[in-house]
Amino acid sequence: MATLQKIRNRGRILIATVGLALFAFIAEEFVRSLTYTQTESRQRVGKIYGEKINVQDFNALVEEYTDVVKYTQGANTLSDDQLSMFRDQVWQTLVSDKIMQHECEQLGLTVTDAEMQDIINNGRNPILAQTPFRTQQGVFDVNALKQFLNQYNELMGNPNTASELKEQAQQLYNYWKFIEKIIRRQVLNDKYQTLLNSLMVSNPVSAQAGFDARNNEADIYMAALPFSSVKDDDVKVEDSDIKAKYEELKEMFRVNEETRDIKYIDINVTASDADKANLQKEMEGYAQALAEGADAAKTVREAASLVAYSVLPVSAKALPHDIAEQLDSMSAGTQVGPFVHDHDNTINIVRLIGKVSLPDSVEFRQIAAPGNDMAAIEKTADSIMAALAAGADFDTIAKKYDQPATKTWLTSSQYEGQAIDENNRKFLGTLTTAAVGSYNKVVFDGQGVIIAQVTDRRNIIDKYDVAVIKRSMDFSKDTYNKAFNDFSSFLAGNAKAEDIEANAAQAGYTVQTRNNMSSTEHKVVNIRSTRETLRWIFNEDTKVGEVSPLYECGDNDHLLVVMLTGIHKKGYLPWDDEQIRSYLTSEVMKDKKAALLTEKMQGAKSVADVAKMEGAVSDTVRHITFSSNAFISKVGSSEPALSGSVSKAKKGDFKSGIKGKAAIYAYQVLDQKKLDAKYDQKQEEQKLQQTIARSLGNFQNELLQKADISDNRYIFY
């Protein structure tokens, strides 16, 4: 009993303790769940139809695409700009695929494996001709594909297969699977489009109307009262007018992604006068060294020139345009510079060492002399040279050593501008200077011997042995530090956006505006390396009126600060947005001016009456048809309303009060005629069907709005 009483007495404490423990457990699970949710959210690159797109999944798609690009182009690496472009392409394709899948699932449209196999077997899809599985005539060869797929399975399943061979097979297999995916996507899209097109059909009535719209012409004499003839001050625009016009035109202002407005100060740090003077002095030293006969290659290298010295004479097209222009007026042994070129912000020295006439293109064939060591190789090479000198056939000797000796064209563009070692210098130098038909022995230091014959030479041009020292007029560290410190000091004293705007000009800075900026842009105001700035601009915690940190960006030559001035959420832009309001005000003013001018024109009985009115213009306009908008040169505008009105009028009719885009019109029909064209109902219905198909092609825009797409790629890239 005593124990039971103790439990009763301590029951409340026990319950509280258990309750706290239970709460701690629940709280722990809640925190764990919240942490997972936050982590998952941070890994979300976007959302389509409510489906969250994980960044790893998106990266896998990008990698798949870039691997295909590298495979087809023979590239090992891609630039940052290329990667940005490919990510955009992959995202756009992903969005398009998700939309199409969403629509087709509801309609029951699919592409079966059997359909795919049939497409591959008949081989007529144009995409198949882009694969390596082709005949010599360029036609897709399904047997070659099947043979590869069988070999692929054998290679990948064989542990003795060389890793390099496996890698090559895997690349080709991945490329084929990518092609399959493209074809499947294309066929599904075609099915959807065909179904959509079949919902709208042409008919004889519409076909006849379309024919008449093109072939019934009218000439008119018209008079117009341009809107510009009414002063803006004579028209009063109220907010209620603007709001009403906004509701009328609201769909024009729908946007599918959030945009933001910014103001910013961008400082592009450039070389100071002191920096330029120091570089000038340094360049004068190099100029003196070249003039005194210093080794050209060594001097150019020590000067860190943007144009490397070539051990072979080069054509003018291999040199920067400004340098090539200097060579036209120079003779061998002369020198110009240092001189400044403003267009690329450089200071330059050019010394022309020599000029020769050489072929731009050379055709040659070769035999690599075999042997176990250089002594044996040279002995074989001498034997080949002796046999050729005695009249032996080049192809016969090549076959003897199991070599094709195929004739190959070599052009200057294939080697100019490339790093050339001593062995390549020997080989290229021999080919470009050898006579047609001659046999030439080229010994590569420790690497072998080539017997080369030049079989043709074309396009003899001037080539130059030239030393070029081109240096950018870059800013010094001191110059950059001064610009940074000065700007930092200004921002420290002007922490608020309004202070920055008020005092920037006095401090020598310019505040610029960029409206409707999208997070899908890869550069802020077209400056490189501004990813962090972009993240700040579109961060959900960044509020209108806030000022960003000072960013060092560009090619380490820009200082940037940004002020957020506006946020436009996805959906309809507000009527009082500065640009929207300006546009709506202009439209309302046109409407009110049109009303005044229409009233002014009401009493007119003829075109002549209107032509006498103040501000009126008149003209004869010919060849007006319903299918094309009449262009009225006197007001500088195309006027579809005028074309529509004229197409319904009869010869001799007088019409007035026609509201156009730039004026109110009155006109009289002078003449009507039909063009000498034969009506073909079948052909007209086909044209009409094509027009319908083009119009229906805009369905993607409608589906985009329904897909509720969010794009957070700016957070990751």
Image: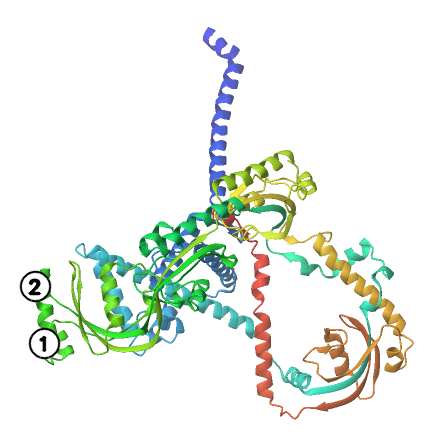
The quarter of the displayed image where residue 497 is located: top right
Q: Earlier in the sequence, mark 2 or mark 1?
A: 2
Q: Position of residue 276 (x, y in %)?
A: 50, 48
| Residue placed under numbered mark 1 in the picture | 387
Kind of residue at badge 1: Ala
The quarter of the displayed image where residue 637 is located: bottom right
| Residue placed under numbered mark 2 in the picture | 376
Q: Position of residue 526 (x, y in %)?
A: 54, 53
Left/right of residue 586 with respect to residue 436 in the rendered view: right
Residue at 81% x, 65% y: name it: 591
Check the image and name the residue furthest to the right. 603
Kind of residue at badge 2: Ala
Whether residue 44 is situated above or below residue 101 in the rendered picture: above
Binning the other alpha carbons within 10 Å of mark 1 as few (below 14), some (14 to 19) or many (20 upward) gives some
Residue at 68% x, 61% y: name it: 252
Query: Label 2 to label 1, Cα distance in Å?
Result: 17 Å
Residue 3 in view = yes
Residue 247 in view = no
